[in-house]
Amino acid sequence: MTLAQQIITIGMCILGTIATRYLPFFIFKENKKTPEYIQYLGKFLPSAVFGMLVIYCLKNVEVLHGTHGIPEGISILVTAVLHLWKKNMFLSIAGGTICYMLILYFL
C-alpha cells in the first residue's frame, strides 16, 4: 500500500468507528422513548453474539483425535465458573483465554 492508501484506510476506520459510537445518540434523542425493538436487541443480542462466538471457537474441535477437546472444555468451564463467581465479563474472558493458552503451552 502506498502512503496515501494507508492514510485513506486509517481515516475510513476512524470515521467508521466514530459513526458507530455517536450515531445512536443522534438517532435516539434523550427526550424520546427508545423503540421496543431496540430495547429487545439490547437485551438479547449480547448473549446471542457470545453464543455464536462459542460455537465458532468450537467448530474445529475434534473429539476423536488429538487432545479430544479437553483444553477447550476445561477453558469453557473456567470461563463459566469465573463469570458466575465474579460477574465480570473481562475477568471471565481473560481467565478462560489464559487457561486455554497455558494448557496448550504445557500439554
Image: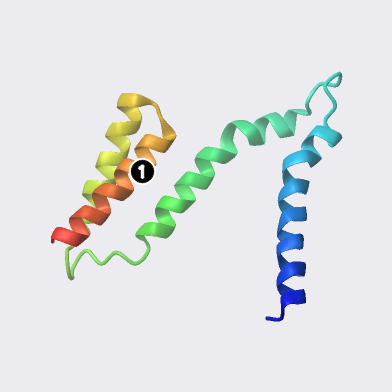
**Res 64 quadrant in image:** bottom left
Circle 1 SS class: helix
Percent across and percent down for residue 77 are: 25, 41
Tag 1: residue type?
Ala
Quarter of the picture containing the N terminus is bottom right
What residue sits 78% from the left and 37% below the top? 24
Percent across and percent down for residue 22 are: 77, 39
Residue on which the image places disc 1: 94
Q: Residue 2 or 19: which is nearer the viewer?
A: 2
What residue sits 52% from the left and 43% below the top? 48
Percent across and percent down for residue 52 are: 48, 51
Asked whether residue 56 appears in the rendered view, the answer is yes
> How is the rendered protein coloured?
rainbow
**Res 44 quadrant in image:** top right
Q: Residue 105 or 38: which is nearer the viewer?
A: 105
Q: Is residue 34 above or below residue 79?
A: above
Q: Is residue 5 above or below residue 70?
A: below
What residue sits 73% from the left and 33% below the top? 37
